[in-house]
Amino acid sequence: MRATIVALMVASVAGCVPDRGQQLAECGKEADRFLQAYQSINPDDPRSEYIIECMAAKGYNFNVLSVDCDSKRPFPVQPACYELTGWPICSPVSFVAP
């Protein structure tokens, strides 16, 4: 019985793990749509600010002090420079009977 409950809990949370890279790419596409003339090299650039705010709306905190955040590349476009701030926001999982 306990194994069944644990398996259901794991299955329901499994769909809640967000993909930082995919979400950053979505924010980058939105930024390209509105701010094509700007670069994302400096965090103070309008395009970078848009990406950082977009990721914040998705539940991520911009942190350049992360171990995996590489100083040789622009910080705002690196998924490693974003940390999840709380529980992931996920859509309800629906189970289909066989």
Image: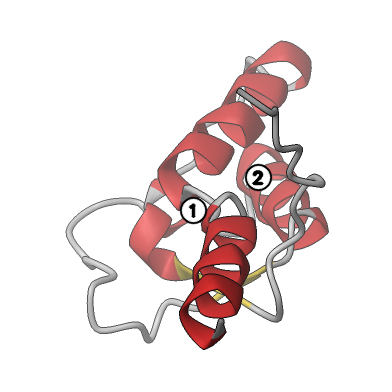
* Residue at 42%, 67% in the rendered image: 81
Q: Amino acid at mark 1?
A: Pro
From the top left corner, tell me how far across and down residue 48 is, in percent. Answer: 61, 46
> Where the C terminus falls, by quadrant?
top right
Question: Badge 1: how crowded within 10 Å, few (<14), some, or many (20+)?
Answer: many
Position of residue 42 measured from the top left corner of the image (x, y, whole percent) = 49, 54
- Residues tagged 1 and 2 counted as in contact (Cβ below 8 A): yes
Mark 1 sits on what residue? 76
Amino acid type of the residue tagged 2 in the rendering: Ile
Instruction: Provide the secondary structure element on which disc 1 rests.
Output: helix
Q: Residue furthest left?
A: 72
> Is residue 51 or residue 55 the one in the foreground?
55
Question: In terms of secondary structure, where does tag 2 sit?
Answer: helix
Residue situated furthest front in the rendering: 1
In the depicted view, which residue is nearer to us: 68 or 34? 68
Q: CA distance from mark 1 to mark 2?
A: 7 Å
Q: Nearer the viewer, residue 29 or 96?
A: 96
x then y, percent, for residue 9: 61, 71
Badge 1 or badge 2: first in the primary sequence: 2
Identity of the residue drawn at 72% across and 13% down: 33
Q: From this view, report whether residue 77 is shown above or below residue 61.
A: above
- The answer to whether 15 appears left or right of 75 in the picture is right
**Is 9 on the left-hand or right-hand side of 7?**
right
Q: Which residue is mark 2?
A: 51
Question: Mark number for residue 41?
Answer: none
